[in-house]
Image: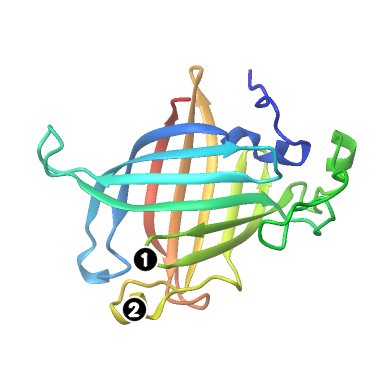
Amino acid sequence: MFVLPEGLPVELNPLAFLVGSWEGIGVVSNKYLDPENNHEQKFQQRVEFSVGESNYLTYHATSRLIGDETNGSQDIELPAELGFWRLAKPAETADHGPSVLPGSGARKIASAEDLEKLRNERGGFDIEASIIHPGGAYEFYAGQVKSGRIDMRTVAGSHMPMHLIEAGKGWGYSERMYGTVTKEGVTKLFWIMEVAASVRDPLVPLVSVELDRIG
């Protein structure tokens, strides 16, 4: 039976299933860069969702491409991702900011009844996620979490540095899906990412991963 992480702020309950450490194997495709010669490669990924005393989850993902040698000598370290995930809701005085200035007063979401007021018309909760990459790319996602599944897409506020665009390594739009499933008592986290040159272009598969909970 799933137990809410100790000390989790009430407003993060809909995202509680993510909290912890995950590790597994996935595939990354070059179809977006080379549609005529689609090639998939296996990679290993470790994902951590952690929570402090504030109203967001910290997301950190590290990955390495799996080489042909079983001793790992041909593995390649891949770019990490760092981000912050939260429920989408109006700012309040208890929120910190600007920058490192602390908030003041009590949070408005203090009970399950308060949280229910944020449920959207589709039966889920609206969320936001910001994800940054070492090359300077910044993705700002909006979407929803419902029944252990997250669907989100990039929206205004995302940024792709010109040096990546000029090198053909940028993308203009992306969608991600995260979801858990429990089989024979083992919980797994699946996530996929699709990208496109713009919101008007067809999405192309980029990443697909299956992760096991390790902590």
Left or right for 151, reference 76: right
Secondary structure category for the residue under label 1: loop
* Amino acid type of the residue that numbered disc 1 sits on in the rendered structure: Gly
Q: Residue 85 or 123: which is nearer the viewer? A: 85
Which residue is pictured at 74% across the width and 47% down the height?
Answer: 124
Q: Residue furthest front?
A: 101
- Residue 167 figure quarter: bottom left
Q: Is residue 19 above or below residue 199?
A: above
Residue 17 % position (x, y): 61, 33
Left or right for 46, reference 31: right
Q: Which residue is mark 2?
A: 163
Residue 201 % position (x, y): 46, 76
Mark 2 and mark 1: Cα distance apart in space: 9 Å
Residue 24 % position (x, y): 36, 35
Q: Residue 182 or 84: which is nearer the viewer? A: 84
Colouring: rainbow
Is disc 2 in contact with disc 1, using a CB cutoff of under 8 Å?
yes
Secondary structure category for the residue under label 2: helix
Left or right for 212, reference 6: left
* Amino acid type of the residue that numbered disc 2 sits on in the rendered structure: His
Residue 106 % position (x, y): 87, 43
* Marker count (numbered): 2
